[in-house]
Image (cartoon, rainbow, N blue to C red):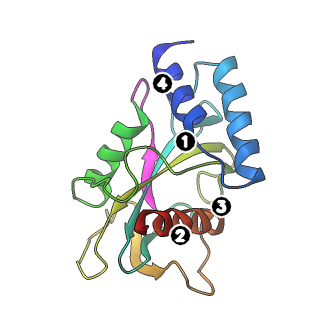
Amino acid sequence: MEAATAAVAEIVRDLTPGDDLEREHIDRTLRWLAESDDIFRRIKPATPPRHLVSYVVLVDPDERAVLLGLHRKAGLWLPTGGHVDPGEHPLATARRETLEEIGIEADFGVIGTDPLFLTITTTIGIDGGHEDVSLWYVIRGDRHREYTLDPGEFTDHRWFALSAAALPATDPHFERFRTKITAALVSADR
């Protein structure tokens, strides 16, 4: 196992699953990492057909809100983030994507620099049909501050309350993330 793959495997092993599906995704990811070092997207949009992504979720922990953008290609309201470059550490990707897509330095002061969540998703939209293995990082935001998301990636953005009864079309795992981040925020308040 190459060093970059081993670093990702260590991150994944350290995750605490929030539910049975996340446990399954963690197990599948660890098997994939043990079988292949070809885990980084090399050719857009889908080579190899399963590759690593770092989501970067901007959360206002005081207002219990999350900023989502309407993604151009997926047509869904998504967190910022992107593909992990070959050999890049997923945390470095999270920092890079924060600068590229939000224009700010990432502040990991909400729950720390480890990802909170892991998902495997078959993508939809213009470049759909491949699998993203996504590590969900959480960064601090302020609902009362104006952010501008990269217009090349997003057509709109807005804040959503974590307690909202319903959200627009988003990542299929976002509801599970919402449950996990809400529990993490309650734990951090103690």
- Choose mark 1 or mark 2, whichever is in front: 2
Disc 3 residue type (three-letter): His
Task: From the image, tell me which residue sits under label 3.
Answer: 173
**17 or 135: which is nearer to us?**
17
As for residue 87 lying within the magenta part, the answer is: yes
Q: Earlier in the sequence, mark 3 or mark 2?
A: 3
Task: From the image, tell me which residue sits under label 1.
Answer: 45
**20 or 130: which is nearer to us?**
20
3D distance between C-alphas at marks 3 and 2 = 14 Å
* Helix, strand or loop status at disc 4: helix
What segment carries the magenta color? 79-88
Disc 2 residue type (three-letter): Thr
Most extreme residue toward the front is: 190
* Helix, strand or loop status at disc 2: helix
Q: Earlier in the sequence, mark 4 or mark 2?
A: 4
The image position of residue 63, as x and y in percent, is 38, 81
Residue shown at 44%/26% (left/top)?
Answer: 86
> Is the residue marked by circle 2 packed among few (<14), some (14-19), or many (20+) residues within 10 Å?
some
Q: Earlier in the sequence, mark 1 or mark 4?
A: 4
Asked whether the beta carbons under mark 4 and mark 3 sit within 8 Å of each other, the answer is: no
Question: Which label was assigned to residue 7?
Answer: 4
- Choose mark 4 or mark 3, whichever is in front: 4
Question: Which label was assigned to residue 182?
Answer: 2
* Helix, strand or loop status at disc 1: loop
